[in-house]
Amino acid sequence: MLDDVPAHILMVEDDDAIAAPLARALGREGYEVARAANGAEALAMATGPGPVDLVLLDLGLPDMDGLDVCRHLRAGGFEAGILILTARGGELDRVVGLDVGADDYLSKPFSLSELLARSRALLRRASRPLGDPVEPAAQAPTPAPEVGAPPASRGDLRVEADARRVWVAGTEIALTAKEFDVLLRLDAHRGAVVTREVLMAEVWDENWFGSTKTLDTTVGRLRQKLHDADAPVVLSTVRGVGFRLEDAAADA
């Protein structure tokens, strides 16, 4: 996201008493805010022609559960950040929300400062959505693809840590923040097993005591994206231990 272009936030909230002041507060921070009052409207707006860099998603919507909105968005290839805002604060609710594709979870009531901090973090970390075309030379303020590394060969997988971008044979793969963080750590130890405990501590939180199913879900999405892009790597599960990213066998 270019520094001089405001981030576009889609707020999915049916309660006017919450939506109106929150939209004003986000607007004062320089964000462009659009609002959807139900799940169907949210799906249409998030997948429409306008840019969406972050979704603030309430779960208690009048027409469908917010978890289903999140699930449909991820299944349809939506790559921007999703921050769930809800009164459901139990551990199981948080785990389910993360499992279906949310990047973060904030329980109501919450402070505005915490919401803004979490939103900034997701906007910094999230990859550019697929629907936001950018000329390569215009987007990258740093010359990472050309400096300090040989040109990418056909079928090459390149993970750029500073730019938070992933390339296969010159084509960029759009990943969510968590997918990128997992790939970054696996690629740094390519050929070796990275344990589940290490991935959970480094990508999520060292104090995370909930289900690790969210890790399996993230790895599953990442594996599918690498496969769809014909990346020359294999992301293997080592049962009871962790995961290993290794070069695929060179078949003629």
Image: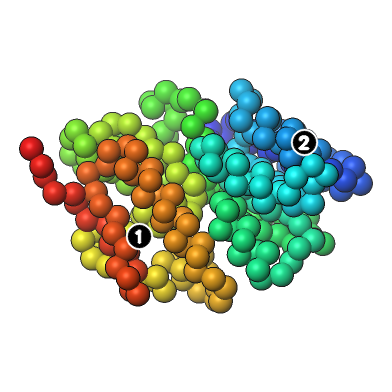
Q: What element carries label 1?
A: helix
Q: How crowded is mark 1: few (under 14 residues within 10 Å), some or many (20 or more)?
A: some
Name the residue at 23% across, 65% down.
192
In front of the other: 136 or 210? 210
Q: Name the residue under label 2.
A: 36
| Nearer to us in this view, 8 or 72 | 72
Q: Give the label, 1 or 2, closer to the camera.
A: 2
Residue at the (50%, 74%) spot, across then down: 206
- What is the crowding at mark 2: few (fewer than 14 residues within 10 Å), some, or many (at least 20)? some
Residue 223 visible from this viewpoint: yes
Q: Name the residue under label 1.
A: 185
Q: Is residue 192 left or right of residue 178?
A: left
At label 1, which amino acid type do we have? Arg
Residue at (22% x, 40% y) in the render = 156
Whichever of callouts 1 and 2 sits on the residue coming sooner in the sequence is 2
Q: In which quarter of the image is residue 22?
A: top right
- Position of residue 38 measured from the top left corner of the image (x, y, whole percent): 78, 39
- Picture quarter containing residue 25? top right
State how far apart marks 1 and 2 are (Cα): 36 Å
The kind of residue on which mark 2 rests is Ala
Q: Which residue lies furthest to the right in this view?
A: 17
Quadrant of the drawing holding the C terminus = top left
Give the x, y percent position of residue 194. Answer: 32, 68
Q: Can residue 31 be seen in this view?
A: no
Kindly identify which numbered label has been placed on residue 41: none
Q: Which of 163 and 208 is in front in this view?
A: 208
As drawn, 208 above or below 19: below
